[in-house]
Image (spheres, rainbow, N blue to C red):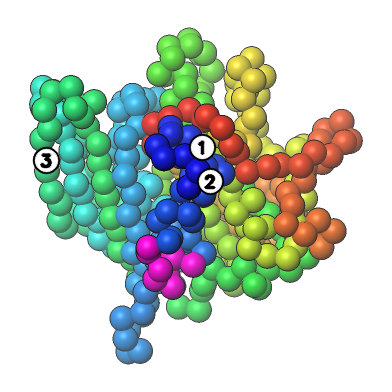
Amino acid sequence: MKDDRILITHGAGGRQTRNLIEKVLLKYFKDPALRLLPDSASLSISKSCADICFTTDAYVVKPIFFPGGDIGKLSICGTINDLAVSGAKPLFISCSLIIEEGFKISDLEKIVMSMANTARLNSVRIVTGDTKVVDSGNGDGIFITTSGIGIKRRGFSIDIDKIKPGDAVIISGVPGMHEISIVNARENLGFKSNLKSDCASVYGLISKVFSVSNGVKFMRDPTRGGLASVLNEIVSNMRYGIRIYEEKIPVTKGVSSFCEILGFDILNLASEGRVVMIVDSDDCEKVVSIMRKHSHGRMSSIIGYVTDELPGKVVMKTKTGGERFILMPSGRQLPRIC
């Protein structure tokens, strides 16, 4: 890489993150499971048993307690979601804690209790872990790493090669709520609207979709880099483009006002309880219908379609009738949102 130091932008989930992974990490990590950089690795153990999915993630969010969740709930939901969007039923999770000397044990208990409750509600077991304590001033509170294992749904795979023009792009709700919640809490901005993090498990929602459709071709939870990052990752691996429609993107008045006042693009903001899907055109309406019946999918919407007119590009038709290209986020995003 041209620069010889890690920058905060390398962790923002946009273009710099992609460059770091491709030019440094993948130069040495060459396992075929990494080819498409999925949320979880899909691994075959033997012909006689189902494939497993395996994922890992680190959590450094600040503040550790925020409207709608905390670092503990976030770590469990994030790991469950990475498995769920890979078509797996989450089963087991590991928990590694790095705790700064002086951290309140009462806060640690709140976090661990939140992890346990979230795992229990999702029928997931926390089965192994590790704890390290670092000197005061060298840890900034608490960091958590979780890994997860799940059993992959038979017959399902993330297969971008199956995507074709006319397939629908679906999002399960208002994007960016998690990052908005973190910004509001961290900067003490005082917005009084219901700006809670969307932090939640999407496994139940995805299970409902699978009960009515075999037409799901791609899923991703739009975390760092938001919807813009996910859509650009998709088109970078196929010969088609994607056109989305601004008026179809679900938003609330509070979110719209927040973004307008602070100059944020909602497409670049992270969610922690949403799923983006590419679904066969024949199934998209019934998929959205079943999603809207789930508590975490009430505002699900078809926001666009795959097109052969714009290979490798994402374009948005604006409410005013114009069009603009949606690029992979770059530059400094808000750090430590997850």
Asked whether, in this view, residue 315 is left or right of residue 64, the answer is right
Labelled disc at residue 173? none
The answer to whether residue 191 shows anywhere in this view is yes
Q: Which element is circle 2 on? A: loop
Quadrant housing the C terminus: top left
288, above or below 117, in the image: below
Reading the image, the residue beneath label 3 is 132
Question: Residue at point 37% right, 63% down?
Answer: 28
Q: Give the amino acid type for the residue marked by disc 1 in the picture.
A: Ala
The answer to whether residue 82 shows anywhere in this view is no
- Where is residue 303 shown, x and y percent of the image? 71, 47
265, above or below 285, in the image: above
For the view shown, which residue lies furthest in the right direction? 321
Q: Which element is circle 3 on? A: strand
Question: Residue at point 53% right, 54% down?
Answer: 220
Reading the image, the residue beneath label 2 is 222
Label 1 neighbour load within 10 Å: few <14, some 14-19, many 20+: many
